[in-house]
Image: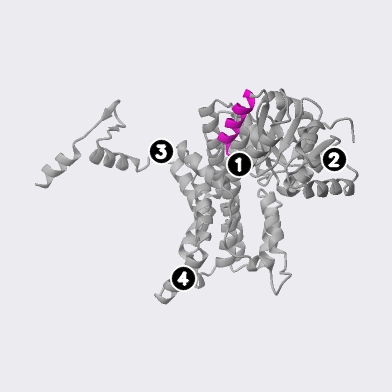
Amino acid sequence: MAAQTRIGLAGLAVMGQNLALNIAEKGFPISVYNRTTSKVDETVERAKREGNLPLYGFHDPESFVNSIQKPRVIVMLVKAGAPVDDTIKTLSAYMEKGDCIIDGGNEWYENTERRQKAMLEKGLLYLGMGVSGGEEGARNGPSMMPGGSFEVYKYIEDILLKVAAQVPDSGPCVTYIGEGGSGNFVKMVHNGIEYGDMQLIAEAYDVLKSVGKLSNEELHKVFTEWNKGELLSFLVEITADIFGIKDDKGEGYLVDKVLDKTGMKGTGKWTVQQAADLSIAAPTIASSLDARFLSGLKEERVQAAEVFKSGGFSDILSEQVVDKEKLIDDVRKALYASKICSYAQGMNLIRAKSVEKGWGLKLGELARIWKGGCIIRAVFLDRIKKAYDRNPELSNLLVDPEFAKEIIERQTAWRRVVCLAVSSGVSTPGMSSSLAYFDSYRRERLPANLVQAQRDYFGAHTYERTDMEGSFHTEWFKIARQSKY
């Protein structure tokens, strides 16, 4: 092997293997290690096969650590939680002052901050780096979100800039996010936005299939067409692909044989919990999480369908007659408008956290690094970047002049789709809650005055007035009782 390698990577599940091969392919000699040594040999084999790449495998942690040039940088790609702490313990035993560990997993940001502190006491540096793009992205260019020690970031910046996805007009999809656990936090919200995106696409599918009666062939065509316009994105592209794939184990299309039960790892849940903690409305992301919970109740749903059918619940779907072409166009507009709301919520959550923690995150720069490599990559992110370039202090994406105009142009179609879905008995929680978010945000006055009056009535919580300064309390109960008698 070379005298010493430039960087190390521990944790060789598919993501780890692919990222290591990507780094090696970009010309950086890399050492790899995994607790189960067969994975090490497998990765070394792949490196030979995929172009004799400068990748060197080690079966024990000590020789692995010692093979890397100082100051040593080791990327970990292991399961979040305890496995990360175990790996740190194993590796740091052989590391020296000034060396660094980078956690590339989906870790809870406070765990990263706890580890940064603990490492610093040993003279070691630490970065928490979100990596998005799945297996394919890791191998050919992911979007990366490193947060923590700026010093470490600068030391490996040359590697990250080459390894990241490259977008022709806006450069490599990586940037220094900020201090502490900001990299992990931004990746967490990215995943929350991804939940919203996937749910909105699923609702578009449901309305087109259940109400519009589109076949899989037609859906394949529609999504392929949509992927040429403002909805051009990785998720719309793979959706089109899915509708075109026949079942290899039987008749028809594979998508119809997939059980309607969605799994999850936790990042979506964390996003919604953080939104609640920071008092940020994120209804589109929250409704996508609820939709996953409800999808998990498959057995109960089968029984419920039976109960309502036998109870005389008539199938409202069959009564709908729709103009297919018009419906397709309306759904496209509704999907786009809802998507703007979902991203607005995610960006506001990132901003609120950034203010709370003093991270100074740049929202336009985040939109830029999400333009390639990651799961939510979309042409639409360029518009978001430009919106924040125009006005870094933008309070909400909805009020950016460009986006406001786009929503105004699409809102009647959006309302038509939601109304049609409601009257057909097809649930569109993402589109409906996005619309409710928009309608609440754009209204000068909401019925919150009544809720505050109720709070003052039963709990003396006081209220403010529209016509004078100060806080007020009224003995509502006494006045009401007097007027009754």
Q: Mark 2 points at which residue?
A: 55
Q: Which amino acid does label 4 sit on?
A: Gln
What's the distance in space between the residues labelled 4 and 1, CA to CA?
39 Å
Q: Mark 1 points at which residue?
A: 82
Q: Residue 444 carries which label?
A: 3
Q: Mark 4 points at which residue?
A: 303
Mark 3: secondary structure: loop
User: In this picture, is 462 found above or below 206?
Assistant: above
> Mark 2 or mark 3: which is in front?
2
Q: Which amino acid does label 3 sit on?
A: Glu
Using the rendered view, name the quadrant where residue 163 is placed: top right
> Mark 2 or mark 1: which is in front?
1
Query: In the depicted view, which residue is nearer to us: 200 or 254?
Result: 254
Q: Percent x, y for residue 211?
A: 55, 66
Q: Do the residues labelled 3 and 1 touch (CB within 8 Å)?
A: no
**In percent of the image, x 68 and y 43: which residue is there?**
78
Which residues make up the magenta segment?
Answer: 106-121
Q: Do the residues labelled 2 and 3 touch (CB within 8 Å)?
A: no
> Mark 4 or mark 3: which is in front?
4
Q: How crowded is mark 4: few (under 14 residues within 10 Å), some or many (20 or more)?
A: few
**In percent of the image, x 73 and y 26: which residue is there?**
99
Q: Which amino acid does label 1 sit on?
A: Ala
